[in-house]
Image (cartoon, rainbow, N blue to C red):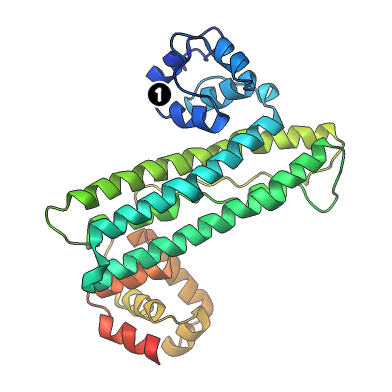
Amino acid sequence: MPERPFVPSDKLKRLIDCDNALLLVMNRFGISLGFGEKTVEAVCSEQEIDRDTFLAVANYICGRDWRIEDISLPSIISYLKKAHSYFLDFMLPTIRRRLIEAIDCSGGDNIALLIIKFYDEYVTEVRSHMEYEDTTVFPYVEGLLNGRKRKDYSIDGFARKHNHIDLKLKELKNIIVRYFTQDGNNLLYSALFDIINCENDLNSHCSVEDNVFVPAVRAAEEKAGESPDGQDSKTGSGNGDARQESLSEREKEIITCVAKGMSTKEIADKLFISVHTVTTHRRNISSKLQIHSAAGLTIYAIVNGLLSMEEIRNLNEA
């Protein structure tokens, strides 16, 4: 049975005692520290914070009852924008600096360089994901609130394509844990904990978007007389622990081709199989290894002797 929801008369420190992750929620709502024994009601009033939206998000994150009616769209948009700034301007750059300190790319360690490349590609994807929301989704909602209706866009269109950007960070963590060897590296363990914390925070952030922001926008669309297409939104979910099965010889061939930068069509032509068969093998490989990106498969191929770093260099120079 869920615990009772947080209410305005609760002391703000009680929320933090229940879940330290709510410190990040406070930061994104603009709540300053040093509130002593004050209640949620008092702090939100003094600091001009939308009390009901703050409590709704806090209750949602802690698995407690909350109401969509309590969500103010301007407040939740401000919260999400500040979360984007936190990830892009602070957390992700911090992790990159710590990774570079931990794995020391200056000595020409090829796996270390590939890990940094993987991370940089991931950050580029996250930036694109969040900038789309900042420049397209949020302005759409703000226009909706100001009476500007669009017939060519609805929040369901966004929701169907919304993916959980924490999953690739989980993939990077797993690659480092399983394939990067450095003994007694306290910096690396510390960087891994940063990655895990960021992964959890990103998962929570995407969940708030899927299950708080999107339903609140749908309600606003209905109130404004919009006609969303009514299809179920496709929310992201963790893949769970995949079975660690042995790779077939064909799957190893395909991993090698992917690591060489070949397209699905090129792989199909080289191995005399259909594009559909290549796609099926890629899906099975991802399920077995929990590695979904070309950069991740390249690291796997090198570490497991399917391809040498010399071959990769020759391909890059060709």
Out of 300 and 169, give the one closest to the viewer: 169
Is the C terminus in the top left, top right, bottom left or bottom right quadrant? Answer: bottom left
Out of 28 and 129, give the one closest to the viewer: 28
Out of 293 and 2, give the one closest to the viewer: 293
Q: Amino acid at mark 1?
A: Asp
Is the residue 39 above or below the residue 277 in the image? above
Is the residue 93 above or below the residue 318 in the image? above
User: Residue 91: where, in percent of width, then height?
Assistant: 42, 46
Q: Provide the residue designation for mark 1.
A: 19
Q: Mark 1 falls on what kind of element? A: loop
The crowd level at tag 1 (other Cα within 10 Å; few <14, some 14-19, many 20+) is: few
User: Residue 255: where, in percent of width, then height?
Assistant: 36, 75
Name the residue: 57% across, 45% down.
235
Name the residue: 70% across, 33% down.
74
Q: Is residue 285 visible?
A: no
Is the N terminus in the top left, top right, bottom left or bottom right quadrant? Answer: top left
Q: Is residue 145 visible?
A: yes
Q: Residue furthest bottom?
A: 318
Name the residue: 41% across, 45% down.
199
